[in-house]
Amino acid sequence: MGAGFVHLHVHGPFSFLDGASPTEALVERAARLGMSALALTDHDSLSGVVRFVQAARQAGIKPIVGAELTMEGGFHLTLLAANRTGYRHLCQLITRAHLGSPRRQPRLAWAELAGRSEGLIALSGCCRGEAAAALWRQDEETARRSLLRLRDLFGGRLYVELVQPLWPGSRKVVAGLARLARELGLPVVATNDVHFARKEDFPLHDLLTCVRTLTRVDELHPQRPLNGENYLKSAQEMAELFGEYPQALEHTLRIAEACEDQVVPLGEKLLPSYPVPPGWSSMAWLRELTYRGAQERYGRLRRKLQERLEHELAVIEALGVADYFLVVWDIVQWARRQGIRMAGRGSAADSAVAYCLGITEVDAVERGLMFERFLSLERAQAPDIDIDFDWRRRDEVVEYVFRRFGEEHVAAVATYNTFRARSAVRDLGKALGLEPNHLDELARRLPHIPADAIHHVLQQLPELRESALVQGPGKERFRLLFQMAEAVAGLPRHLSTHLGGLILSREPIAHLVPLQRAAKGVVVAQFDKDDVEAMGFIKLDLLSLRTLGAVEDTVRLIQASPGQQDFRYEAIPLDDPDTYGMLRRGETVGVFQLESPAQRALQSRLGAEQLEDLVASVALIRPGPIKGNMVEPFIARRRGQQPVEYLHPALERILKKTYGVVLYQEQVIEIATEVAGFTPGEADRLRRTMTHHRSQKEMEAIGELFVARAIQRGVDPQTARAIFACIEGYAGYGFCEAHAAAFATTAYKTAYLLRHYPAQFFAALLNNQPMGFYPPHTLVGEARRRGVVVEGPDVNASQEGYTVVMRADGPPVIRTPLWVVREVGREGAAAILQERQRHGPFRSLWDLCRRVPLPVDAWEGLILAGALDSLHPNRRALLWDLPALMRAARSGSPLQAAPLSVEEQAPHGLYGGACGQEQVARVPDFPPWQRVCLEFYAMGFSPGHHLLEFLRPSLARQGVLSVAQARRCRDGERVQVAGLVIRPHRPPTRSGRTVVFFTLEDETGLLDVTVFEAIYQRWGQPLFTRPAVVVTGRIQHQGSDGRALIAQAVRPLSLSEPKTA
Amino acid sequence: MVALSRRLEVPVDVALEGPFPKAFRWRGQTVPVQAILDWWQETGKWWEGEQERRVVRVLTPLGVYELAGQEDGGRWLLQRVLD
């Protein structure tokens, strides 16, 4: 027999910082307490409902979908959807509350309820309900009026909500509400305004309330709960609280009964019809466009191609997704017409139709890619097409989609930022009253891990284990912090916009999902990508890719160079020997997808000679293949050091391009069809089962089916088992070939740009920061090493972005823009440029201060960065005189009116001689070391120098080699090398042990360092805490040109001013 | 409505009837509880290890007092006197 009570007012994690238990924990507890149903009523949100419905069904209890709406005046109103109509009205009301109010302050006008109450059951609200709040103020008349208004709106579907929070005076309020209900003939209902599952979860809820209200635990705030009573109480506990009001308990069951089981429309077809030309059906129009595209791509249509297109079109028709392809085609066409650089990615590149429509640039037929990896009848899953756009213009594309398909029919998909180790430490630590700088230091040392893994890394990582913070006098508070962080792990912190996901719907989206406004004003659905898929929406992924911005900039800079106006990115030859030579040397800093230390090492060892090698490279350096030990066998076979063997002749065709190694997911599908006669869809199901690491039992069952089918087709049992063991071992780690191929093309082309146009390429990379693996100072160093001169910013020469000057009589020059200087920013830089364009070059610091009103910090930054060197070379003197000049400029002293002449320009004087002062402050300039340090401070890099240059003499005396010297050492030679620590990271490893990889950077180049666990535990502390280190270790040769250092010891390197010998 | 109150936080012996006080010892005399006016739950400084306590506002011949007892029914404090 079920419990005699159901909770109808429950806040889950999507009440954001006001719900402290995961949805599953709430459902599980309700089920364990024998409750037949449970409602979810988050604040102004239905974000949690899809997973709530799924969890409730799994637990065998009825899900009741609702929300607690914030009404005008800040009052709360609890609404439950009794049926589909109610659900639709709830979506509309929440949308209106959000879109009609300032962001993050949803408020619904009472008038909005009129006409939208059908299908909704209203509970009058918790202690912040209008009636209850009035009674707390002892204003019975207002309470009565409020209930009457709700009765007019909801009629017999209004219940007076009784909440007993066990606060001082709450009994009186409950009694008052019950009395009013009797007087007005309204039924009462008991709730507990639940915010967490168990009483012991209260501290986390209180702490989250502190985070929400920006208070510390030892501070008061009216929204902080007085006690921990708002948990999911048992029927017995609720009966004890509401013994005087038995009907209030009974009515919970009546309401649960009245709510239909399936109010959320899940799994429906929601895609809009594409507006095809008159006389065409969607499918016929798609076929027409596909064949037109095929004609353009291939010229002559071979039978094999035609068969493939027909097969794909048949699947598209059967799945009813022709309109989806047309929508994507439309968007791509538009973007192309606007000149927006784009590239399709992901499994859509397995489709020949997508290639013919111009959505992707990978020829699926020529590569022999399996369409079923993308779409299959058996899987019957919605297609998911991802397209990358130049990051600066992606929003234009999104705006077009809204315009083209109607604002009401398009929305961005939400994503939820959940608490992870760093965010939990920062947020909860602040609420616990810990010092912000201590929290910052701790958070920066934490790897990107879930919040409940902190305890593990505290013991494991030396930079944390040895931290004085965690071990010091305040360690008890830190212990509490880690305990709370563990409890908050995985709870959503806030809603944000998915990077690229958009949904389109034939019905106005606000009827199906509530909408709200995210940052930058984007209208976003309250559901994430999994939820929208479960609902039946088809998602479009329109992503921003900075690499495409860099490509666009490179192309423009090349075309602006003498004799290069006809340069075309699309015409880059895919077989350039110089480019492959560069790749083989591992000189790939800046190359899309191939620049990480692991990729650079792979390139050296693999000996890339063709695009196919790059496709494999993109697929190989992933956590899966590394953990699955696929890299070494692949390299050995590729280099002919291991024989390439096939378990069965049928595998040769499939695995030839990967030297017998199962590397791609498409290969698993093909093996299953070829060897065991699976249909392509069945084969993809097999791949998916393997990829998602289902149960051992399931794997065994599939294995038996595979072997039995293979035997039926004449394969001997032993071979059949061996083949299955092989794909079973690799399928979980395999990568989508189509995706790898799409990325590899861009990777190769960026490598080509780097090899042949380094100045333009590095200028473009610097213009599109932050992007890629390396910080700007590494890119600047790389550009210098490639013979490019990098000039610092100059108030009279810098342009809007990094620019390139090609010189006939010298190396190319990259000129740094002004916005890179701290405190200047884009606006400050634009102000200087505008003034220069309007009234000519600046003649002195005085002239600058007079003509451009910038804050003192900005001027200081510009001076330290060397942007005024052309006006006067002594930076310290400029700094010295700056305050007086600014004061004069502000006050409009005679200096301001004084005429300036060409003759009066620097270097005669800071003031341009305008007031008869020829002198600058007589102070010596900064010494060279300090100038470089200050350039780093002002810009994050030094255009002309590397810090290590200055330490070189002293390092050399200690026997510490430069990177260039170390690279020339023998394999296995023991060396000491010093440098800046670039990107230390601990990727997953096959053994599961911690291995740290980082790059040492000095004035001569980069050297990748590997620090194995034992060395890391003993010496690793400075790697994540200090900017520069000296590493002792052995040189390892990787291929003919690759070099790495295997660390044996690490010590910090002081970057204080070098002593002269 | 209570106009004034004084916070005391003084440990007192309490005789219980069920979960509620029926009398307490104060300044050498036993003060009988005439009526329970209200009661509520209060969470203390949980971050410093304090437990939740039940606060009971009682009417006595001497006036209105608030007694606070811990969940386990152990220690009681005379928390406040309302003038």
Image: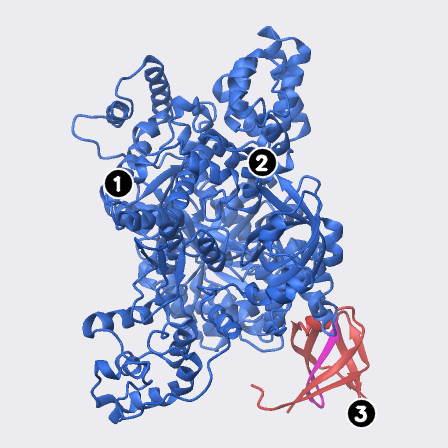
Distance (Cα) linking label 3 and label 2: 89 Å
Whether residue A816 is visible to the viewer of this picture, yes or no, is yes
Number of residues whose C-alpha sits closer than 10 Å to that of mark 2, classed few (under 14), some (14–19) or many (20 or more) = many
**Where's residue A295, x and y in %?**
25, 22
The amino acid at mark 2 is Arg
Residue A562 part of the magenta segment: no
Figure check: B58 above or below A791: below
The chain holding disc 3 is B
Q: Is residue A55 left or right of residue A366?
A: right
Residues tagged 1 and 2 counted as in contact (Cβ below 8 A): no
Residue for point 50% across, 31% down: A613
Residues tagged 3 and 1 counted as in contact (Cβ below 8 A): no
Residue labelled with disc 3:
B27
Tag shown at residue A605: 2
Same chain, labels 1 and 2: yes
Residue B64 part of the magenta segment: yes
Chain A colour is blue
Number of residues whose C-alpha sits closer than 10 Å to that of mark 1, classed few (under 14), some (14–19) or many (20 or more) = few
Whether residue A165 is visible to the viewer of this picture, yes or no, is no
Residue for point 31% across, 44% down: A341
Where residue A428 sits, quadrant-wise, is bottom right
The amino acid at mark 1 is Arg
Number of residues whose C-alpha sits closer than 10 Å to that of mark 3, classed few (under 14), some (14–19) or many (20 or more) = few
Q: Which residues are magenta?
A: B59-70
Q: B15 or A572: nearer the eye?
A: A572
**Where's residue A892, x and y in %?**
26, 91
The amino acid at mark 3 is Arg
**Where's residue A192, x and y in %?**
57, 60
